[in-house]
Image (cartoon, helix red, strand yellow):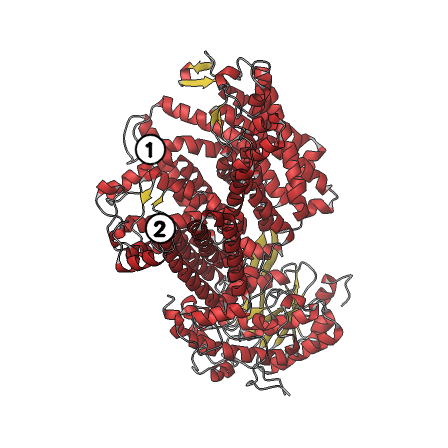
Amino acid sequence: MSSDIPDASDVAEAADSADAITDEPEANDSAVEEAAKHVPSGAPPLRVEGLVKRFGGVTAVDGASFEVEEGSLTGLIGPNGAGKSTTFNCITGVHEPAAGSVYFKGEDVTGLEPFRMARKGLVRTFQIARELEEMTVLENLMLAPKGQIGESAIRAVTPGLRGEVVEQEEAIRERAWETLDFFEIDHLATEHAGNLSGGQRKLLEMARALMTDPEVVLLDEPLAGVNPTLEEKLLDRIHQLRGDGYTFLLVEHDMDVIMNNCEHVIVMHQGSVLAEGTGDEIRNNEQVIEAYLGEDI
Amino acid sequence: MSDDSARPSETEAPESATAAVIDAARRSDLGLILGTLLAVYLVAALLTFTDGLNSVVGLMRTLTFLGLVYALAALALNLQWGYAGLFNIGVAGFMALGVYTMGIVVRSPDPAFGPPGFGLPLPVGILAGMLVAAVVGLLAALPALRLKADYLAIVTLGISEIIRLFLQSSAFDTYLRDTLGVGTGGGSGMGMPRNPVRELFLVDGQANTPTALGDFAFGTFGESGLGISNTILIDWAYIAVLAGVVIAFFVLLERLGRSPFGRTLKAIREDELVADSLGKNVDLIKIKVFVIGCALMGLAGILWFGSQGNVSPTPQFMPVLTFYVFIAVIIGGSGSNAGAVLGGIVFATVLFEGPRRVGASLRDVIDAETPPSFADAVATLDPTAFLAFATDNIAPLQFVFLGLILVFIMHRRPDGILGDRIETAAAVDLSERPSGGETDE
Amino acid sequence: MGTTESSIVDSARARPGLLLVVLLGGLLLVDLAAKLAGLSLGPLGGSVSVDRLGSNLWNGVIIGLVVGLAGIGLSMTYSILSFANFSHGDLLSTGAFTGWGVAFLIAGFGDIPVRTLLSVRDAGSASAGDIGAHIVSTPIAILVGLLAAFAITAVVALALDRAFYKPMRDRDGISILIASIGAALIVRYVIQFVYGSDRRGVTASVDASNLAFGPLGLSVNAHELTIVVAAAGLMLAMHFMLQRTKLGTAMRAMADNKDLALVTGIPAERVVTATWIIGGGLAGASGYLYVLLRGTIQFDFGWLLLLLIFAAVILGGIGSVYGAIAGGLVIGIVFTTSTIWIPSDFNEAAAFAVMITMLLLRPEGLFGGVSTA
């Protein structure tokens, strides 16, 4: 039953002021955020065109272009050093690409800082889980939601204005608990994130990413170092969320995971896209086999 | 500020001063702080009781004053360093900016009384002092906060020294006099405006014209009552004001910490990239924190040095002042506001004033002449003479002691006294699931 | 992961600031040329004679050499141990006091009580003239003092490392930085306790120690010449050590990329030990030479120089020995020539401003030295 992950509208209902949560404390792109989500808008949620990124003399990404379809679970694979992580970093704004463009729902977002991408609705997880160790699991989750009015220092301290902050906090806390339920880590809520096991950290990261109320989620090897039971659970959650309209782009080392779960697979090699297609198409692609020569497909 | 926040609370967060104080007491921080103060008073009384009540109260006054001003500065630094990880070692400079600006704004425009000022009311001066500290903080923060922590440290130290060199400079003084008609006094510094607390007790601050309140206070406790000197009594009244400001600072920072803003700060301190990736404008938040912290440092400078009669850039605002404040924060445990207050008190009393007092007391019981130099002391081959030299030169030994404490803490207890206590970063209770919420089953 | 972390900073920074700095530098040069020609273009400063410019530059070079020499050690420990050592300045004081104690002992032995000599005139009443330490009259004393400054400071630096820094090798740079502030307090105030807090004269004055260089209008005194020779000699020795010896190669490798160096089997602790010995020794020597230049000594002079040394190291690029030397020269020259435009109250502030500008615009330093990240 728990497939309906709570989203912003639930919180807004819970909060007394329905507009509180979409109200950006630092002004700006509220128009984008108010746009109804999960409604196909024509333009793909994520499109990358001719992306180039160099480090010193090394070209890590060399003209990569691909598209991620609305509501899809797209896999991104490639041998080590193919440029997957760098591509991720260019999309999320950690690196600024030397050339090429990134489009989010048709809008050119090339080179926007990570926090602006997150506010637009594109969030990522990290290859090595970066949970905030000194914060509890619940605090980790409560950090993430957008539009928290209490992030304004003035509102946080002024006596008359703090009431609203507390109301919103209550709503966010409730949503955090529901998200913890969904990932079945609610028993860890008051635990410090630093005490979690590797697999639990991965769950926490995904839960935290979802708390930002994203449209596109970039998962960087979410299953690395996760035991098979937990892996099953994570994949199950990803499929449920996809059913709810979230779009996923998944980088994964484990071929089987990609082939068995993603309807669309992108293969990167030496910084650019080598092949695209369904799992079966990729499996039988001569070039891909050659690129992976010596590796087990 | 404290009047405003003293309203009764309706929510579970520390909504008012009283609630915050009760909250602190519940977690026994307040108890710890008051207990420390009491222990300090006890030792002070033991050291001075033979000299009479006036000496006891006088020493307690000095210790309390220093404890509170260090607590104030430590709270401001804790916001920048403890909460957001911004390693600012220019504290002395920002305090100097605050108190100098206040002095310049308030001092009389008549150059006959020393460096001229604008002759504006004191509240304007205090606000201006905080504002200037904040603006310089902003100018420094805009580019510098992108730097690595150790570079930020060097830049802020450089800024603090540049500020001190400017205040020290007679050329800058002359320049200000020529352009704005105000002065800094250069190396000899400037006198501070009259303390309004003093004027509560004395008409125009003159020693022999007490007000009605002054008459009452001096009559009851003063020379004609318990025998405590009038100056000490007035100082205690100022200490009461200081204590009020420390409490207000504390409440302000606790509320800031226990809010989504504080949560974001905690996240930034731990992992900037994560905060960034979750949609937090890391640069903007760092700038805000830095500027707020600098304004509070300006205020701390005003309340501290503004009450000392005279300020001069050297040696009052040498970088070592910054390190004192750092030691206070480190002792208490960076990241904890109660720790900052406790650290301020412990530093000022036990580490800063303590050795001097103990050294002086020891010196009194040693029956030997002080050798003129270390080499002479060693040459006598007499342990008593050496001890006499050591107790007479307690100041450098005290700094050695401070250094050892600092290294020891970094080795053995980098979290300080209270730093391992992890404070909740939310405006609501997170300890258990609220019963009102729906359960999944 | 390293690239990911630094990239927040590296993301898109157009650098209008750099242009501004170049422009400002150009303007100052034009203004200087005008001043030399006797024209008054700019609003700041009066006219400048070739003689004054020459002596400013010469003084700048000397201060720069001393600061650069001190910077070598700071730069090395910064890059190899990944922390900014705030006790480095006090190593200069350590070298100066111990070195001058030894120099005095040799110069004044027999005539003056030993406690006066070893305490660098803290005890007793002999004047600097009575002791008569000067490169012309007592060259051996001055040179042995320099060696002693190097040796004793190297030992002190190593002892500080073993006591304070070694237990913290795996900690983050800021924690070690704070510990180094503690170490700085300890060293500085032990010096004050032992040697006293008075500023006092050290060198004697000797007739005919000035050598005039007619055509340049320079007047060079024998101590300045000693400093140039000694500093240049130590720098050259450093250069050969780095380029020609196995130890030097290992040091360069560690400074360049610590992880890689460790993987390739460089004996890390041995390199660290050597770094402290050489870096500390050079700091001590530089402190000794600084006192030779100034002629006076005070317990906290090294601490007061620390920020200038940081400025030199940052300017040259952290981790680069040659950068530290070049940075020292630039800082020294800024320090002395800035008085052409601004009152001498601000020459230190000008040097700090140059450092801050450098950090903001080009944190990797003039020579793009290796980053410690």
Res. C242 visible in picture:
yes
- The amino acid on which the numbered mark 1 sits, given as a three-letter code, is Asp
- The amino acid on which the numbered mark 2 sits, given as a three-letter code, is Thr
Q: Residue at x 51, y 65 (%)?
A: B30
Few, some or many residues within 10 Å of mark 1 (<14, 14–19, 20+)? many
Of tags 2 and 1, the one toward the viewer is 2
The Cα atoms of the two marked residues, 2 and 1, are separated by 58 Å
User: Which residue is more in the foreground, A126 or B405?
Assistant: B405
For mark 2, give the secondary structure: helix
User: Which residue is more in the foreground, B421 or C116?
Assistant: C116
- Residue A181 % position (x, y): 63, 81
User: Which residue is more in the foreground, A234 or B439?
Assistant: B439
Q: Which chain carries label 1?
A: C
- Residue C162 % position (x, y): 68, 41
Res C31 label = 1
Few, some or many residues within 10 Å of mark 2 (<14, 14–19, 20+)? some
Q: Which residue is drawn at 29% across and 26% down?
A: C38
Q: Mark 2 lies on which chain?
A: B
User: Which residue is more in the foreground, C226 or A89?
Assistant: C226
Question: Which of the image's four quarters has the C terminus of chain A?
Answer: bottom right
Residue B81 lies, with reference to residue B402, above or below; the image says below
Please name the residue that numbered disc 2 is placed on.
Answer: B231
Residue C68 lies, with reference to residue B108, above or below; the image says above
Res. A96 visible in picture:
no
